[in-house]
Image (cartoon, helix red, strand yellow):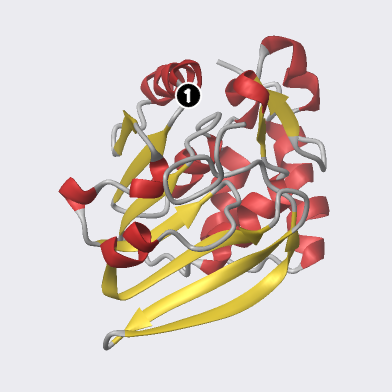
């Protein structure tokens, strides 16, 4: 079956990612292959490869392709990692991760989003993604520790359960700040020591939960 978006995807990779300094060849190849248009509503498919976020159900968004690439590159995936994602959303970030690591565990609090993402994972035969409905700020303790944790919503601070569930050594990327503007933070754990570095300014939807924002 012909993929009518293949050329558009390759242009997205070259113009939005390579030109802005994304150098990880695995990420560039993966994002040239994963069909981003399947993770948005049919009416939005023509815009799926644009250089901007798009609205999805539940007043949430699918992140701009560049931000997906930045967060993924920061994780320095080698292909063997067990990854925890907080905020499944459309499922696109989990899909990208699943091509670059061993196993993805992803948590979403909105059932309609989770159901939609699972449907696309099955359609694409991305069977190394396990998803659940829950408060993502609590993590997913049953499968901890995780080599890598990625959070795709912004909280006022880094949730303590996620730090606890991160392996040692381990690494995490998460946007932290107020509800309007945040800093993308890169956290590492090594020999019990936590180090946090700021990457760049971003704007994400709010991380709702016991260790995040209230749902008001």
Q: Is residue 182 left or right of residue 92?
A: right
- Residue 23 against residue 211 in the figure, above or below: below
Image quarter of the C terminus: top right
Q: Nearer the viewer, residue 92 or 85?
A: 85
Q: Position of residue 103 (x, y in %)?
A: 29, 48
- Residue 211 against residue 192 in the figure, above or below: above
Q: Nearer the viewer, residue 42 or 154?
A: 154
Residue that appears at 51% across and 59% down: 26
Quarter residue 108 falls in: top left
For disc 1, the neighbor class at 10 Å (few under 14, some 14 to 19, many from 20) is some
- Residue 159 against residue 124 in the figure, above or below: below
The residue beneath circle 1 is 110
Query: Across the whole image, how many numbered discs are drawn on residues?
Result: 1
Residue that appears at 40% across and 42% down: 136
Q: Is residue 30 left or right of residue 135?
A: right
Q: Is residue 210 left or right of residue 16?
A: left
Judged from this view, the residue extending furthest toward the left is: 142
Q: Position of residue 122 (x, y in %)?
A: 36, 21
Q: Secondary structure at mark 1?
A: loop
Q: Is residue 165 left or right of residue 157?
A: left
Residue that appears at 52% across and 40% down: 208
Residue that appears at 29% across and 32% down: 127
Q: Position of residue 73 (x, y in %)?
A: 56, 64
Quarter residue 61 falls in: top right
């Amino acid at each position: 079956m012909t993929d009518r978006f293949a050329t558009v995807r390759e242009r997205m990779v070259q113009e939005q990612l390579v030109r802005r300094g994304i150098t990880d060849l695995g990420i560039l190849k993966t994002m040239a292959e994963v069909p981003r248009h399947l993770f948005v509503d049919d009416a939005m498919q023509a815009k799926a490869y644009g250089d901007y976020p798009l609205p999805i159900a539940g007043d949430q968004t699918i992140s701009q392709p560049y931000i997906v690439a930045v967060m993924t590159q920061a994780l320095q995936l080698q292909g063997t990692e067990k990854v925890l994602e907080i905020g499944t959303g459309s499922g696109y970030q989990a899909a990208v991760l699943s091509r670059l690591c061993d196993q993805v565990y992803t948590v979403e609090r909105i059932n309609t989003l989770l159901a939609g993402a699972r449907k696309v994972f099955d359609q694409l035969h991305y069977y190394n993604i396990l998803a659940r409905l829950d408060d993502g700020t609590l993590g997913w303790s049953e499968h901890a520790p995780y080599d890598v944790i990625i959070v795709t919503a912004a909280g006022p601070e880094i949730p303590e359960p996620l730090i606890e569930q991160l392996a040692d050594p381990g690494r995490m990327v998460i946007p932290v700040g107020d509800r309007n503007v945040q800093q993308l933070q890169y956290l590492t754990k090594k020999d019990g020591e936590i180090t946090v570095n700021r990457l760049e300014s971003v704007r994400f939807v709010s991380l709702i939960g016991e260790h995040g924002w209230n749902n008001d």
